[in-house]
Amino acid sequence: MKKVKLMISAIAMLGLVLSSTAFAADYAPAEGLYLGALAGSGSGFVQPKVQTSTGPTDNDVAGIYQATEGGLGLFGIEGGVVMGYGYKMGNLYAGLEGEWLASDVEFKLTSSVEIETGNGGADNTFTEVSAKKTYSGGAFGRVGYYINPSTLFSIKGGVLVSEFDVAYVGNNSQSETYYAGGPAIGLAMESNVAAIDPNLNIRIGAVYTDFLTASVQGIGSENGGGDVNSEVTGEALSARVGLTYSFFDVNSLF
C-alpha cells in the first residue's frame, strides 16, 4: 500500500512539474502539440463506370456504360477530431497533422419502376442505388504564415482515405464496403480565443480530395452467369469549422 501511495505521489509531482513547464505557456495558434474537434459539410461527385460481360444466353450484351461528363452529387455533414504538432519559426510555421471525421455524405438514386438485371428465370430487380461515405481519415504536412501573433494562415497536403458503403436495394439486395483515397490539399485560418483561454483557437478551413479509381467488384453479379464489374472515381470538398487547443511543447522541456 505504501508503494502505491508513493507512486501516486510521484505521478502527481511529475504532473505539477510538467504543468508548470510545458502547459503554462501561451502558445500561438497550432503551436506545439494540439488536439481539436471539427465539424462541417461535405460535397462532391462520383463518376461510375460499369462493364458487363456476356452471359450464358444470346440475350446478354456486353458493353461499357459510364458517365463521361458530370457525375452523381454527394452531400452531407461531417464531424471528427484532429491532432497535430506545429513549430513556430518567427512568422513562419511548419507542422504535421492527422484527422478522422465521421460522415453521412451520400448520394441515392431511386426508381418507381423496378429495374431488371440478370437473365432467364434468374432475374434480379432493384429500385434504389446508394453510396454513403461513412468516414475519412488522413495525414498531412502543414506550412503557414502568422499574419499577426494570434492569427495563422496555413496550407496542407497529404493523403486522405474514405470508406464507402454501396448498396442495391431490390428483390436480391446487395451491398459492399470499399475504400477510396487519394491526394488531398487544404487551407485554414486559425486565431486564438484569448477571452476564454490564450491556448484555445478557432479554425475555419476546407480540404479537397481527388479520389483515385476504386473497383466495386461484388455488386451487380448476375445469378445466371454474366458479370457486372463496376468502378468509381470522383472528387470531394469538405468545409469545416472547429476548435483546437495547444497544450504541450517539447522545447519547453529543455
Image: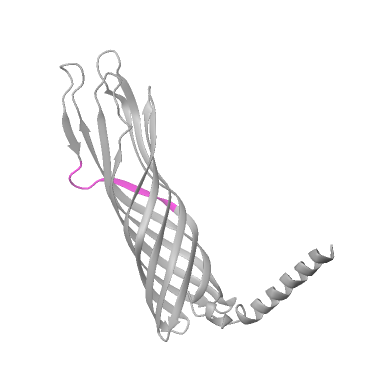
10 sits left or right of 77 in the view? right
Q: Position of residue 60 (x, y in %)?
A: 18, 21
Q: Residue at x 37, y 23 (%)?
A: 172
Give the magenta range: 67-77
Instruction: Answer whether residue 26 is visible to the viewer in this image.
Output: no
User: Residue 119's quadrant in the figure?
Assistant: top left
Q: Position of residue 175 (x, y in %)?
A: 39, 33
Which residue appears farthest toward the front when viewing the image? 3
Q: Pick whichever, 28 or 180, lies toward us.
A: 180
* Quadrant holding the N terminus: bottom right
* Vertical arrangement, residue 60 with respect to residue 128, above or below: above
* Vertical arrangement, residue 32 with respect to residue 63, above or below: below
32 sits left or right of 214 in the view? right
Q: Check residue 70 for magenta coloring.
A: yes
Q: Check residue 99 for magenta coloring.
A: no
Q: Position of residue 100 (x, y in %)?
A: 46, 56
* Vertical arrangement, residue 14 with respect to residue 123, above or below: below
70 sits left or right of 171 in the view? left
Q: Residue at x 35, y 63 (%)?
A: 158
Q: Position of residue 30 (x, y in %)?
A: 48, 74
Q: Pick whichever, 207 or 250, lies toward us.
A: 250
Q: Residue at x 64, y 77 (%)?
A: 18
* Colouring rule applied to residues: one colour
Q: Residue at x 56, y 83 (%)?
A: 254
Which residue appears farthest toward the right when viewing the image? 1
Q: How many marks?
A: 0
Instruction: Answer whether residue 44 is visible to the viewer in this image.
Output: yes
